Image (cartoon, rainbow, N blue to C red):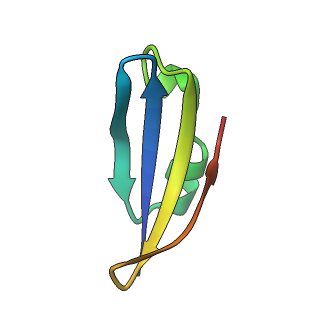
């Protein structure tokens, strides 16, 4: 099973704004979903290992 972790980056640091298996929900996230974020990144985890990561916005 794939787990999607969406990270919001601000000038103060980062935080997880979504962690779950719903790919559509993870990839549809916007800056409005993460108040004050400057950028969103997604990490994809499978079988306990990170298999991919990239910037959403």
Residue at the spot 50% in from the left edge and 66% down from the top edge:
44
Front in this rendered view, residue 29 or 41: 41
Q: Position of residue 31 (x, y in %)?
A: 56, 24
Whether residue 14 is situated above or below residue 54 in the rendered picture: above
Residue at the spot 47% in from the left edge and 29% down from the top edge:
9
Whether residue 27 is situated above or below residue 20 in the rendered picture: above
Front in this rendered view, residue 15 or 21: 15
Q: How many marks?
A: 0
Q: Position of residue 11 (x, y in %)?
A: 45, 17
Residue at the spot 59% in from the left edge and 50% down from the top edge:
27
Q: Quarter of the image for the C terminus: give it.
A: top right
Front in this rendered view, residue 32 or 16: 16
Q: Position of residue 52 (x, y in %)?
A: 58, 68
Q: Quarter of the image for the N terminus: give it.
A: bottom left
> Residue 2 lies in what quarter of the image?
bottom left
| Residue 6 located left or right of residue 13 | right
Whether residue 37 is situated above or below residue 16 in the rendered picture: above
> Residue 10 lies in what quarter of the image?
top left
Residue at the spot 64% in from the left edge and 43% down from the top edge:
56
């Amino acid at each position: 099973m794939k787990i999607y972790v969406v990270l919001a980056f601000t000038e103060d640091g980062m935080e997880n704004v979504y962690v779950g298996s719903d790919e559509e929900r993870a990839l549809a996230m916007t800056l409005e979903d993460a108040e004050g974020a400057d950028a969103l990144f997604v990490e994809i985890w499978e079988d306990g290992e990170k298999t991919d990561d990239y910037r959403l916005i």
